[in-house]
Image (cartoon, rainbow, N blue to C red):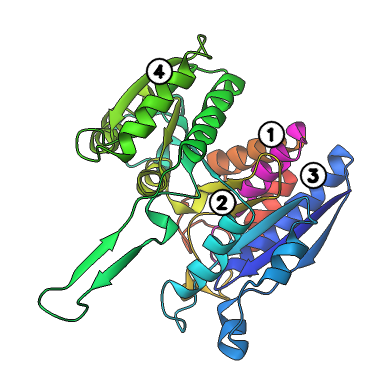
Amino acid sequence: MYKIAVISGDGTGPEVVSEGLKVLDAAGKKFNFKFETMSFDFSGQRYLKTGKLVDEKDIEELKKYSAIYLGAVGDPEVKPGIIETGVLLKLRFALDQYINLRPVKLYNSDYCPLKDKKPEDIDFVVVRENSEGLYKGMGEFKDKGSQNEVATQISYNTRKGVERCIRYAFDYCRKRNKKKKLTLCGKTNVLTFAWDLWERTFYEVAKEYPDITTDYAHVDATTMWFVKNPEWFDVIVTDNMFGDIITDLGAMIQGGMGIAAGGNINPKGVSMFEPIGGSAPKYTGKNVINPLAAICAVGMMLENLGEDKAGKAVENAVIKVAQTKLKSLAAGKMGYSTTQVGDLVVANL
């Protein structure tokens, strides 16, 4: 019995979560596992009414669950940054979800904006450090509001935090067992303190994984090669900021935000799975948003829980629907409604 905490969130979040749970229910019946869900309201509307988002009591309660399933955060009535910091970052840091895992996989060449690229060319994974770096929120203003104002933002990196992320990436690359190639993505020629630590740690840990081929690429070169030669990549490991940027580019070359899912992973604790596309408030309530990313997040969650066959079956059902049914991955252009796409995935399980 798995206990799943559900945070539907804002905008179209509840709509895509509903379809994800529909698929989860079908997978449970097919693969003989049971689950129960509990909903947590950490939405922008609740914040506007109560001033509350995630507090310490919520964190302690969430620690009792097998996994967290998140729809989306972001409400146009709430100042940007408040919900993102008070929900997403709060949960990642408090639950020590120190890995952000982002598969980048093309399911249908018709959705790819790159010329002549096929599914076998775009199939890699980004392992992003998820708890340190510039997102730690460390810094200060001096002489704020004056002509002499200075704003300092600190990229905070520890040997422990860097090494555990890198080890996870090596282990994941070995388990993935494809090209068995791990690329460190950074900026060693400019960010000489943080990336000296990352590079030293990477090559020290690499000695323990002789079966894994390693290389290094500057982040600017990585973005270029995502577009020009995505087939070069297998697994990429990088820091919080660079990972945030390159995974959005990864989503575009795999077909768009409508198909992109991610996991915030604590390998020994509670992990959280989500579509990465945001709350898309302009489509709220119209039953036109693409739920496939949220359904892919369910597949990732199942694999993380050890239900590998069920997780793979969910992904295969999504691939079948993407290849044979949808006209587009864009909201309102799929040829089907949100709920109909969920039904199609269930039918193909």
Q: Between marks 1 and 2, how big is the CA–CA gap? A: 14 Å
What label does residue 228 carry, if any? none
Secondary structure category for the residue under label 4: strand
**Mark 3 against mark 4, which lies toward the viewer?**
4
State if disc 1 and disc 4 touch (CB < 8 Å).
no
**Mark 2 against mark 4, which lies toward the viewer?**
4
What label does residue 293 carry, if any? 2
Lateral position of residue 330 relative to residue 208, left or right: left
Q: Between marks 3 and 4, how big is the CA–CA gap? A: 37 Å
Lateral position of residue 215 relative to residue 76, left or right: left
Q: Residues within 10 Å of mark 2 (few under 14, many from 20)?
A: many
Q: Quadrant of residue 20?
A: bottom right
Q: Quadrant of residue 227?
A: top left
Q: Which residue is mark 3?
A: 27
Q: Give the magenta part as a residue range.
A: 288-309
Q: Is residue 187 magenta?
A: no
Secondary structure category for the residue under label 1: helix
| Position in image of residue 160 (x %, y %) | 52, 37
State which tag comes first along the sequence, 3 or 4: 3
Which residue type carries mark 4? Thr
Q: Between marks 4 and 1, how big is the CA–CA gap? A: 27 Å
| Furthest residue toward front | 142
Which residue type carries mark 3? Ala
State if disc 2 and disc 1 touch (CB < 8 Å).
no
State which tag comes first along the sequence, 2 or 3: 3
